[in-house]
Image: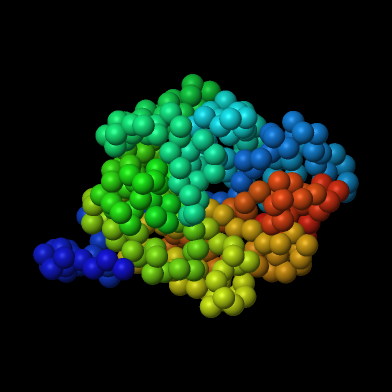
């Protein structure tokens, strides 16, 4: 965890801020009165193109987003890849899914990976087109790409409610230049470029900085202290939470959820910005426990002071029949939602 400089501590105390040396430029917490019950459906159009069908709880074939909406989902999350080899999750695919969500009255979150494929804590590869750029040119490319996607959505009369600048950026993005442990200053410049690009097109869209392992308070403090020291601002802190991926020292989903709630409350107090759990998942073969896990983390997120726990998103609940080897969905092998999805109705 990074510590504040002595001068900055004096400034903080003079301002009467709470713990952690807040920034006067950081947006304050806002109770929107809306709680997002979300689903990431990044694979949906690819699944449909491969012939995968979806059925409602009665077994009737139906549009997947409609099924999700009928299960209490009010928000959709999609991922954006710069130039994917097969086209899925490119800008056109993002727009196609966003239009469908909007037509159903669902809110939208766009998750920029800033890669041609997956970016996560273990890998943050540069898009091929950016690989040979110097850092300043890459930062400009990130701004232009982000603004271009936002402009395209705007042309289609779509305004994302939330936009993530990077996906699970535990150690930054666009490695090695933007690796936070190597240069927090570089990572901060990339986040700022993305933030500015979003706000240039859509000031109302809330910008999220997203880390995994929502139970890991030390990591979150290290990252957000570092970004704040670099003068970065954000609107919401995003977290992933997967109990099955927790380390041996973090035992069981109840412990994971308890630690995540403590972290959410600390993030709000320390930085003065709302929090969201933008990814959760649980083994599909245990839907009863999955429902209990979901109901609990939804309730805990709602309990964050002042309405500043602003949502929970399930990552790819529509996955079934071992799609891409993913086993943390919430639809059964016949394509129907499991009991896990009933947690979003409560």
Residue 55 placement: quadrant? top right
Q: Is residue 102 visible?
A: no
Residue 51 placement: quadrant? top right
Residue at point 85%, 39% (across, down): 61
- Residue 16 place in picture, x, y as percent: 20, 67
Residue at point 28%, 58% (across, down): 226
**Quadrant for the N terminus in the image:** bottom left
Q: Is residue 286 visible?
A: yes
- Residue 331 place in picture, x, y as percent: 77, 52
Q: Between residues 236 and 306, which one lies in front from this camera angle?
A: 236
Residue 325 vs residue 214: left or right?
right
Q: Is residue 128 above or below residue 242?
A: above
Residue 129 vs residue 344: left or right?
left
Residue at point 58%, 30% (across, down): 85
Spot the residue most to the front. Answer: 132
Q: Is residue 299 above or below residue 67?
A: below
Spot the residue most to the top. Answer: 155
The total of numbered circles placed on residues is: 0
Q: Is residue 115 above or below residue 307?
A: above
Residue 160 vs residue 28: left or right?
right
- Residue 192 place in picture, x, y as percent: 31, 42
**Quadrant for the C terminus in the image:** bottom right
- Residue 190 place in picture, x, y as percent: 33, 42
Residue at point 33%, 57% (across, down): 181
């Amino acid at each position: 965890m990074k510590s504040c400089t002595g001068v900055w501590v004096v400034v903080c105390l003079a301002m009467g801020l709470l713990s952690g040396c807040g920034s006067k430029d950081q947006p304050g917490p806002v109770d929107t009165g809306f709680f997002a019950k979300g689903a990431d459906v990044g694979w949906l159009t690819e699944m449909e193109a491969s012939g995968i069908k979806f059925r409602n709880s009665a077994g009737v074939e139906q549009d997947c987003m409609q099924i999700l909406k009928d299960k209490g989902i009010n928000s959709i999350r999609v991922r954006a890849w710069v130039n994917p080899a097969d086209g899925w999750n490119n800008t056109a695919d993002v727009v196609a899914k966003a239009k469908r969500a909007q037509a159903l009255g669902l809110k939208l979150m766009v998750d920029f990976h800033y890669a041609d494929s997956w970016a996560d804590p273990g890998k943050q590869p540069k898009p091929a087109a950016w690989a040979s750029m110097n850092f300043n040119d890459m930062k400009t490319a990130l701004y232009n790409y982000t603004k271009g996607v936002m402009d395209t959505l705007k042309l289609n009369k779509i305004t994302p409610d939330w936009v993530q600048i990077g996906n699970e950026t535990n150690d930054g993005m666009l490695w090695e230049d933007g690796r936070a442990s190597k240069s927090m200053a570089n990572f901060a410049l990339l986040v700022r470029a993305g933030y500015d690009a979003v706000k240039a097109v859509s000031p109302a869209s809330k910008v999220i900085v997203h880390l995994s392992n929502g139970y890991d308070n030390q990591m979150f403090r290290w990252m957000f202290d570092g970004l704040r020291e670099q003068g970065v601002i954000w609107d919401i802190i995003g977290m992933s939470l997967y109990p099955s991926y927790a380390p041996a020292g973090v035992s069981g989903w109840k412990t994971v959820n308890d630690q995540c709630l403590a972290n959410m409350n600390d993030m709000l107090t320390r930085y003065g910005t709302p929090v969201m759990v933008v990814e959760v998942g649980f083994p599909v073969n245990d839907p009863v426990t999955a429902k209990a896990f979901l109901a609990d983390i939804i309730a805990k997120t709602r309990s964050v002071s002042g309405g500043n726990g602003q949502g929970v998103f399930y990552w790819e609940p529509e996955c079934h029949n071992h799609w891409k080897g993913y086993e943390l969905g919430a639809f059964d092998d016949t394509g129907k939602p499991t009991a896990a999805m009933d947690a979003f109705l409560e």
